[in-house]
Amino acid sequence: MSTQLQIQLRKPAEVAPARMGPLSKLPVFYELTSRRVIVAGGTSAAAWKAELLLAAGASVQVYAQEIGDDMASLLARGADQGEITHHDKPWSLDVFVGASLALADAESDAEAQAFYCAAREVGVPVNVIDKPAFCQFQFGAIINRSPVVVAVSTDGAAPILAQAIRRRIETLLPPQLAQWAALAKSLREPVMARLPKGSARRTFWEAFTERAFGAAPTNLDRRTLDDLIRDIATQGPAAGRVTLVGAGPGDAELLTLKAVRALQSADIVLYDDLVSDEVLELARREAHRMMVGKRGGRESCNQDDINALMLKLARQGKHVVRLKAGDPMIFGRAGEEIRELQSAGIVVEIVPGITAASAMASRLGVSLTHRDCAQSVRFVTGHARDGGFPADLDWRGLADSKSTLIFYMGSRMASAISERLVAEGLSPDTAVVVVSGVSRIDEERWIGTLHDLAHGVQTIKGAHPILIGIGGVFTELSSASTCLAASAPSGFRSSAAQQH
């Protein structure tokens, strides 16, 4: 039985990145060195804000007739940078003139409103501590590896959450990152003077970044980087390269760290139809994105056009990320692309991804190799180039009750899969699961038997390709799936077969 697929060809097309989503506040890093900042109040909260401003080099002017212990201590010890002056009097309108920022710790809303209106009248950005209605700007939870500075804001909704996020980020950024950032600052001028804009500078800074998360920089590191600037200036940047990246089944959290790094260093991302928007959004925003999808029975790009495009871009010195759903080495035609690129002398790296079968097993809580049920797992293509089955597919070998079968792209051939396996001796009562959009928010499942496989596929309404799992490991799934559904993402649909 064979079904011919009608494929409409299209050319690879560049796609604009998704627009930036709405921002509750614009994160801005503000130069305050030697600039006047007004702080009204002598409380502990005012003292903490004053200390933060001093760390940024500001000239802090404190207006308060009464000061607490924390403010008194800060005034007594002075500042390592910036300067702080105490004025033993309340603030007045004239003190705002020439100020860069104004902060107050006000006891009442009336006092807060008076301070807010006075600052606004003079045109000075204002913040009243813990009173969001009287704030034009806010302070985030800060991770300080200066000159690397990270700030987290929840727009005042959940300061404790911001602190928790800060603690998590703290664990990711080694303390020595500050030294690497200082080194980067010292290298910036020679890089700009000797290396042209574009790929040459990117090549250098990518090499720099690879070192920056290791041990603290040494004199040897500085000499090595100086040599790299010289080499790139005289020899040019490295030749272009292609990285085949597995995008996984759709959930962006299932990407490997190496995949994320590749996406964030890409010049061009060539991606398939099946790659989720969440994964694509992890790419460097400046990277050009081109959709080169291939879908059975739909408008698709020709593989030769994709190969030619990769060659063309790599020869221009670009870092091309070929982003493929699942794992590129499993039914991803990666072999053809690797052979084409290597024959042209293009460097190719492969970053594996989680294939849909593995994601399905995890989502279902089913071991594909449970020793009581299966001695092997077989991944099988659901159709060949002409839309039918490969002529040499070993159906007798597949009809093994001690194997787990996973059919990729098998929706159109579900009836034939059932008929051929039963004809070769596999019981029609063998357990079957059909999953569409595995790991995605709109994941769908059908659970039944081999006899009802064609019906089960028809119950799937989603637009995603389906995966068919067949074998004894799925026998207990009906009872287990009830529990799993409770933890499924919003939009998840599951249906059990009508037993005949």
Image (spheres, rainbow, N blue to C red):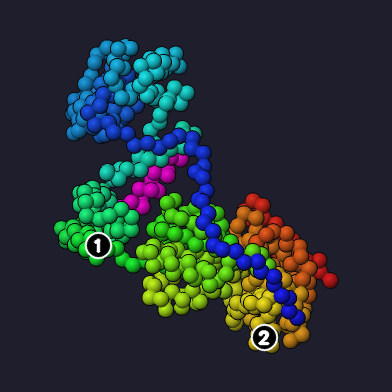
Residue ID for mark 1: 232
Q: Is residue 382 magenta?
A: no
Residue displayed at 42% across by 43% down: 164
Residue ID for mark 2: 391
Residue placed most toward the observer, 416 or 371 = 416
Tell me the SS state at disc 2.
loop
Q: Magenta part of the protein: which range?
A: 159-174
- The amino acid sitting under disc 2 is Ala
Residue placed most toward the observer, 444 or 109 = 444
Tell me the SS state at disc 1.
helix
Residue 460 showing in the rendered view? yes
- The amino acid sitting under disc 1 is Ile
Mainly helix, strand or loop, the magenta region? helix
Residue placed most toward the observer, 336 or 479 = 336
- The picture quadrant where one finds residue 5 is bottom right
- Residue 41 located left or right of residue 492: left
- Quadrant of the rendering where the N terminus is positioned: bottom right
- Kindly report which numbered mark, 1 or 2, lies closer to the viewer in this rendering: 1
Residue displayed at 20% across by 27% down: 83
- Quadrant of the rendering where the C terminus is positioned: bottom right
Residue displayed at 22% across by 55% down: 194
Q: Earlier in the sequence, mark 1 or mark 2?
A: 1
